[in-house]
Structures are given as C-alpha cells and as structure tokens.
Image (cartoon, rainbow, N blue to C red):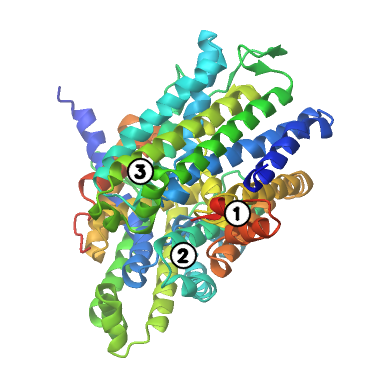
Amino acid sequence: MFSADLFTSFIQYVVLGLMLGGVYALAAMGLALLFGVANLINFAHGEYIMLAMYMTYVVSLGFIQDPVLSPIVTVPVFFLIGVLTYLGVFKRLVTAPPLSQIAATVGILVLLRNLALTIWAAEPKAPPYTVFATSVSLGPLTIPLDKLVATVVSIAALLILYFFLERSRLGVAMRAAADDVEAVSLMGVDTNRLFLVTTGISMALVGLSGSLVMTFQAVTPTSGLLFGLLTWAIVALAGLGTVRGILVSAIIFGVADSLASGIWDPRGREIFLYGLFILILWVRPKGLFGRR
Amino acid sequence: MRRGLVFPVTAGAFAAVLPLTLGLNDYYVFLVTLIMLYTTIVVAWQLIGGLGGQLDLGAGAYHGLGAILTGYLMVYHGISGWVGLIVGGVAAAGVAFIIGYPSFRFGIREVWYALSSLALVLILQKIFLLWTDVAGPLERYIPYAEFDPIFMRSGYKTFYYYVTLALLAVTFIIVHQVRRNKLGLYLQSIRDNEEAAEMLGVDVRKYKLLALMVYSFIAALTGGIYASMVGFYHPILFDSWISIQTVTLSIAGGLGSFWGPPITSIILLTVQEYLRITLGAVIIGLHQVIFGVILIFIILFKPDGLGPLLDTVALRLGLISKASKRA
C-alpha cells in the first residue's frame, strides 16, 4: 500500500545515503589507489582510517576546536605516515606474494587497533560539535549540514584526484603503473619513488576521510574493522577501475547502508552490507567496472 | 619407541600432569585451557590455511556458532553439552559448506576469500544479536553444576582442561594423518599452484571444501567447550579477534610446518597471558601491541615463520622424525 509518509522517509534515507556514499568513496579511494597502482594489499586500511578519526578527536579537542578544520593537520601527518609505512614495511612487500602482504598488514592492523585501545580505551570518543551540526529543511526533507559539508569536501577531493590522475605527469605514470608496472619501469619511471608517493597520497586521502567521518560519528578501536570491510567491499564492487567507478559503488553502499539502518534496524546494517559484499564477490568477481 | 613419537609422547605426558603441577588452581588451569583451546583452532586451521593455502578468517564465526548452539541447548532445553558440541559442529560445517561452496565455485581467492570469511564473523554476530529468542543482546547463563560430566558442566576447570586436551590430541592426529595421505598432497598442490593442480585433475573445490568443513567443525567444538567453561554465552563470542589471532599465529609459526604453529601459539599465547596479567591491569591492550610488532618483524625478516627453525632444532635434538618435517 502506498503511503506518503513512508515515501517521504524513503526519499529521506536515499538522500542521506547519497551523502554517505560521497564520504565512503573518499575512504575507499586510498585503498583502491594503493591496490591498483602498487598492487599492494593493505589489510589495515580501516585501521588507518580509525587512527585518522582518533587524530581528529585529539586535534579538535586540543587546539583547533572544530573538527571541520582538522584536515589541516591530519592530511599532512597522514601523508608522512604513508611515507614512513612505505619505507618501513610496504617497500619490502611490493614484490612479495599476496599472502605475505596480507600477513604483514594484518600485523599492522593488530598493532594499530591495540595501540588505540591502549591509548584511548574502548569507550567511544567524539570530538566537539562542529558549527555545522545543524540541519536545514528542504521541503519535507531534512538535510544535516555536517554530513553535507563532509560530502561536498569529499567530492571536491575526488575531483582534484581525478584531474591529478588525468592531467599531471605523475598521475599518468600512476595509471600506467596500474596497467603494467614493468613497462612503466622500462620507460624510465622510478617505480620505487612512484609507489612511495602513491602510498603517501593514499594515506593523505585516509587522513582527510577520517576527519570528515568524525564530523558526524564517534570512534572506537573496532571502528577500523567496520571501515576496513566496507572500503574493501566498495573496491570489490568497483573492480579497481577509476575514480568514477569507486564513486558509483560507494554510493550504492551508502544508500544500502542508509536504507538498512533507517528502515530496518541500525544494528542490522552490517548483515545487509557484508551480505551484499559476499554476494558481489560471488556474482561479479571482477566488479562492475572491472579491469582485471 | 620410534624417534618420531618421542616429542609427542613427552609433550602429552607433560600435558597430562600439568594441572597437578599448577596445584589444581582453577585460575591457572583456566588460563592454560584457554591457551590450549586457541591452539586447537590454530592446529585445525592448518588444514585450510597451512596445507590448502586459503587465508580463512572465519574461525571466530565457527567458534561462536559452536558456543551459542551448545549454550542455547544447555540453557533452554537442558540438553547435555556433549550433544550441543556435535550439533554446533555440524551446524558450523553446514555454514562452512553454504559459504564455501559458492566461494570456491566462483574462484574467490586470496584477499577476497580472507575478507568474505571475516565478513561472515560479523554477519553471524549481528544475526544472533537481533535473534533475541536464541541469543539476543543479554548474556545467557548456563545452570551451575558442581560436577556433572554427563551434562558437560563442571565447577572445576580441570574437567575442561582434560576435555580440551583430548580435543587437541585428536586434532593433532587428524592433521597429521591428512598430511600423510593423499588429501594432504592434494591440498598442498592447491596451495602451491591452484591452476596447475586443477589441470592435473585434482578436484580443487572438493578438497578445499572438505578441509574447510573439518576445520570449522573443530573450531565449533572449541566454542562449545569455551561457553560451558565460562558459564555463559553471548553474540560477542563471534569474535573477529579469534580469526585474526589464529591466522597471525599460524603465519608466525610458519605455513605448512607441522610443529611450528602450535609451538609458536603456545609460546606467544603464554607470553600474551603473562603480559595481560602483569601489564593488562596497568595498560589495556599493551600486550597485543607487542604481539603486532612481533608479527610484523617475523613476516618482514623471516617470511617462512618460526616453523622451519623449530623443526630444524627439533630434528637436531632427535625429537621428531624426518617424515613430519616434510612440506
């Protein structure tokens, strides 16, 4: 039976889901970039996002006040964390078999997750409210401003990344490396440096998305697991293709997430999302826009 | 006595009298039993992971399923835990089949297999969290009995110690037998090169599925024993940490090595429990930070794990035979 109320709330959840999708796309982009360009499996991606969320908490509690401004700190710091991770761990893993990559990054996962538990304990932590923590009404719909800001910044960052990959020399080298590392290396590109920069950019994106997520969410040491699986699911659906592919599949997951928690039960959203993930693997192992 | 039996028999004899050396202190016996339960999962994981090369992160799902079903039958139907163990084991093997069959059918491997098995842990956890008739958000307590071996409930932890010891021994024997016969060779061929194995006529899907089901059955038994020992169950027992711990200990111990993973597991878990007792009260989680660092170092500087090292030492000392060093 058709009900106007139900329809409105359905549209409301779809709109919220679209916005969530924009943020998820940014969160997954770093993972897709690292996996696509350097062929590195980062099992600890979610844990890095969690770390970025905690850093946002600390920074905005300490001296910036508003979490919206925290990327000023988290982005450069995470670029540096990326560089250090590459030099310390990933550099040795580039040519290693997938199993070793998974094992070593699971080690990082264990380390980061428990480091967070050690430092911040298990209770959820949230930064102070941003000035955008209100909402505007748009006809029958309610648009939360904090989520809107997060979405707009995410999409803007993805656009910049898109033009970087399309236009700049480094971006072209990255895309070429995604297709054929050996050929790129023969063309005189220093792949070691290329992967170093890729890891840095991947982590800078993680830093930004962690900050944006924190504007409307709290963080616990297990947040990493949730974001890890979610971002891997998005990459699975997108199939390692392009920025556009990641955006489309992130929006599908964002809408699915929003509808599942809005119309069914917030506790059941993970059943829905991860069930979708497993189904995607079964039905479309190469993803929607797959290249490999 | 055959040389190959010296080490297992010595270790078994030591394990058999261990509770007495601990003065039957319930707390210490509990900790040792816990270490042995997790080691049992590590040994069983060798079937799918060490031999078959599939990085399965579903241990927490099967462990949790065994715990919940055993506990549920004990609490609501007064059915003995022994029956519950079998029911849990069969259910876990069933779930493993339902998930494993399409996964192997569609050729899901490496990181994707690892992720989908990890997703299974969280899916089951949430399903049972929402299923309030069976598990729900509250802990369910198993009726207390001072000593009731038929119901599989005991106030003395030593009881669970010997149950776990028996399970560990049986698991060792199963894995050892699998390694020696054709199934083990098939699994190793899949691990080393799946395409080549398939081309040579190995039924890849069937053997992977078989290994997965045996492993999930054993993991469910550890869950049932755990629930009865701690006296309650809760969906939190679908614990992704058990999955991660199992895989990390196995890799640190050396994939494909027979004694490496269990010995590494016993050593590292003992260190972990010791650190938990001494440091855990001061700084929560610190012991596992150390754990993570150890793992990263092992993978980076000793990618084969500690297994080959331990095997060589054991061989030199004449504790094991050459046969069990194979692969």
Quickly name the residue at label 1.
A116
Residue drawn at (26%, 83%), measured in percent from left and top? Answer: A183
Q: Amino acid at mark 3?
A: Lys
Q: Chain of mark 1?
A: A
Q: Chain of mark 2?
A: A
Quickly name the residue at label 2.
A207
Can you tell which quarter of the image residue A259 is in?
top left
> Which corner quadrant holds the C terminus of chain A?
bottom left
Q: CA distance from mark 3 to mark 1?
A: 36 Å
| Foreground residue among B319 and A187 | B319
Q: Amino acid at mark 2?
A: Gly
Q: Report whether B177 appears left or right of B147.
A: left
Q: Secondary structure at mark 3?
A: helix
Q: Amino acid at mark 1?
A: Ala
| Foreground residue among A145 and A32 | A32
Q: Which mark is residue B41?
A: none
Residue, far top: B78
- Where in the figure is residue A15, as x and y percent of width and height? 26, 46
| Foreground residue among A180 and A23 | A180
Q: Secondary structure at mark 1?
A: helix
**Residue B135 visible in the picture:** no
Residue drawn at (25%, 43%), measured in percent from left and top? Answer: B105
Are the residues under badges 1 and 2 in a single subunit? Answer: yes
Quickly name the residue at label 3.
B208
- Where in the figure is residue B181, as x and y percent of width and height? 43, 43
Vertical order, B223 against A151 (above or below): above
Q: Check if mark 2's residue and mark 3's residue have beta carbons within 8 Å.
A: no
Q: Residues within 10 Å of mark 1 (few under 14, many from 20)?
A: many
Q: Chain of mark 3?
A: B
